[in-house]
């Protein structure tokens, strides 16, 4: 057997798992489309009397969960690789808190908290946080430093948010709190194209950085040894990741957990560190998890996310840990 | 014969030059050992050759091209450096790591390198779980897959026992001859270097640089610091 054939043979289980995952994803999509306060069976999805619910409620929910899940997972994966830290993620590094601060300021300024209104503020908040975290990370050696900086900035932003809200009007407060609970069912049908387009734009630069993301965990020198510009790719990927995280935060509210956990889940299932595999599979897994959570869209999203996700992730982490020791 | 690497009265360092200006050339098919005490600039010189650090005076040529005119990407096509102090993430598999060196899919080269370095048996293990001897061969394989005619190794024998480091020297020698590569290796295993290297390049504490055939360097007394028998 030539090496090429061996290579193909090794790729086969990955392909099979990808296909299975995709089928599962499709199944969940149809499940979310059909279930809810007005449930109908999978075969009735395309009946006329159901079209109104389907288009105005279920479809935005699906789009929101799929792209939201994808965006956060990919952002988490990129941050973990670029910061060489398995605990990095949009929430841990304070990007979500930074975005929240932007949104709170908008709310207090008397502007209605609608997705499109708060998008620029969330983006600026998110970008600033990544920038500060990154600048600080250069003064720390080791993996804990950057997490500490990220968490501190997160706390700081949250504290400012509390102060801002304390002096804010009741109306703004209510808007902010509903947004702050996080939900995939906030997206209206009008915003579906904007949201999906923004996420796809955020993906593009990351798709072109697969080689950098594969090299980055070994350190900047190793990246440069392989003929890539460290500065260019680091900023390209970090900005795209914080763009993705901020857009999702603006449209769906702050959502913890997905960005941190899904990359580990993808690694646990596919057993490779190759980002050509990890990027699409993390996106798909993130979308699937978010859809699963949105099946219970009447319950608080954060709670559902953790209840479904934590056992799965723990199981995957523990089982892959055992194999590494062999 | 054409020179793969040509250092012309070069000086380098951070604020002040580490060494006196020196000339050095590396030809295809030879293994040159770079010797010297800790802190004399061996690693810095290797880094200089792959495009880090600044030249204070003099020039470095790769074939006919001056280092200053080459971009990071051009250098990647000409020279590869094996870092034995590479920080290795927990999960990376040997298979995924070796593929990092490959720019275009070239499975013939991959197959050849894997046979040469004899790493086929642990492709599915994590890099971190390998023994030091196995890991040194995987690091070498990744650099060989970059397929450059110039190969630099920064203390590849640092964690190796005597048989393992002799094996590595023999392997490097056969690669240099068979593939017509020029190999420069910094090491503290002076005795192995004397036995297996074609030439020596010695950096001395006083800033002098001595290079030449093994016997000539030995006669010149440039290795007195190594306290050889």
Image: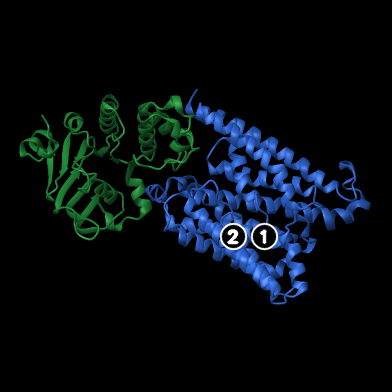
**Picture layout, residue A250 above or below residue B28:** below
Task: Residue under label 1, please give it.
Answer: A249
In the image, A228 versus A301, the foreground residue is A301
The subunit carrying tag 2 is A
Q: Position of residue A249 (x, y in %)?
A: 67, 60
Q: Quadrant of residue A171?
A: bottom right
Q: Circle 1 marks a residue in which chain?
A: A
Q: Where does residue A279 sit, x and y in percent of width and height?
A: 59, 46
Q: In this view, does B218 lie to the left or right of A153?
A: left
Task: Identify by letter the chain in green.
Answer: B
Residue shown at 89%/42% (left/top)?
A: A41
The tag earlier along the polypeptide, 2 or 1, is 2
Helix, strand or loop at mark 2: helix
| Discs 2, 1 touching: Cβ within 8 Å | yes
- The residue that label 2 is drawn on is A95
B42 to the left or right of A259? left
As measured in the structure, the alpha-carbon distance from the residue carrying label 2 to the one carrying label 1 is 9 Å
Residue at screen point 13% across, 53% down: B20
Q: Residue at x 28, y 32 (%)?
A: B172
Categorize mark 1 by other alpha carbons within 10 Å: few (<14), some (14-19), many (20+).
many
Quadrant of the frame with the C terminus of chain B: top left
Task: Inspect this view and state whether residue A268 appears.
Answer: yes
């Amino acid at each position: 057997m030539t090496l090429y054939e061996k290579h193909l043979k090794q790729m086969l289980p990955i392909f099979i798992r990808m296909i299975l995952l995709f089928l599962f994803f499709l199944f969940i999509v149809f499940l979310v489309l059909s279930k809810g306060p007005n449930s109908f069976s999978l075969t009735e999805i395309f009946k006329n009397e159901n079209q109104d619910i389907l288009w105005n409620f279920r479809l935005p929910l699906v789009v929101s969960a799929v792209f939201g899940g994808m965006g956060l997972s990919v952002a988490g994966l990129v941050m973990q690789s670029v910061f060489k830290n398995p605990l990095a993620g949009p929430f841990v590094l304070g990007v979500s808190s930074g975005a929240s601060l932007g949104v709170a300021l908008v709310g207090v300024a008397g502007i209605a908290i609608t997705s499109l209104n708060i998008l620029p503020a969330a983006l600026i908040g998110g970008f600033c946080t990544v920038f500060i975290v990154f600048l600080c990370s250069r003064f720390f050696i080791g993996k804990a430093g950057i997490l500490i900086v990220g968490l501190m900035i997160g706390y700081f932003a949250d504290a400012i948010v509390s102060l801002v809200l304390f002096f804010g009007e009741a109306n703004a407060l209510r808007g902010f709190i509903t947004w702050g609970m996080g939900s995939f069912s906030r997206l209206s049908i009008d915003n579906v194209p904007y949201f999906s387009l923004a996420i796809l734009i955020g993906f593009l630069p990351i798709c072109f950085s697969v080689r950098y993301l594969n090299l980055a965990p070994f350190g900047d020198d190793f990246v440069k040894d392989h003929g890539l510009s460290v500065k260019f790719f680091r900023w390209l990927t970090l900005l795209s990741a914080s763009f993705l995280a901020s857009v999702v935060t603006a449209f769906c509210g702050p959502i913890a957990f997905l960005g941190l956990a899904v990359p580990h889940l993808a690694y646990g299932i596919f057993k490779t560190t190759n980002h050509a595999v990890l990027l699409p599979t993390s996106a798909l897994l993130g979308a699937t998890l978010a859809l699963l959570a949105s099946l219970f869209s009447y319950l608080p999203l954060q709670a559902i996310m953790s209840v479904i996700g934590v056992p799965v992730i723990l199981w995957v982490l523990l089982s892959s840990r055992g194999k590494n020791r062999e | 014969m054409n020179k793969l690497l040509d250092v012309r009265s070069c000086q380098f360092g951070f604020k002040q030059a580490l060494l006196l200006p020196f000339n050095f050339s590396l030809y295809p098919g030879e293994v040159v050992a770079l010797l010297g005490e800790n802190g004399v600039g061996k690693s810095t010189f290797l880094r200089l050759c792959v495009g880090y650090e600044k030249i204070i005076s003099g020039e470095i040529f790769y074939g006919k091209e001056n280092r200053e005119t080459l971009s990071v990407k051009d250098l990647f096509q000409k020279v590869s450096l094996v870092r034995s102090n590479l920080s290795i993430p927990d999960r990376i598999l040997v298979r995924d790591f070796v593929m990092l060196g490959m720019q275009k899919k070239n499975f013939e080269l991959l197959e050849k390198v894997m046979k040469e370095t004899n790493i086929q048996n642990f492709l599915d293990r994590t890099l971190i779980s390998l023994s030091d001897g196995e890991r040194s061969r995987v690091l070498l394989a990744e650099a060989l897959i970059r397929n450059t005619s110039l190969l630099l190794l920064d203390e590849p024998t640092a964690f190796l026992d005597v048989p393992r480091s002799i094996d590595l020297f023999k392997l490097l020698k056969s690669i240099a001859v068979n593939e017509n590569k020029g190999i420069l290796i910094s090491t503290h295993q002076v005795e192995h270097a004397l036995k297996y290297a074609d030439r020596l390049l010695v950096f001395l504490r006083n800033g002098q640089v001595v290079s030449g055939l093994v016997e000539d360097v030995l006669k010149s007394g440039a290795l007195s610091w190594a306290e050889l028998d």
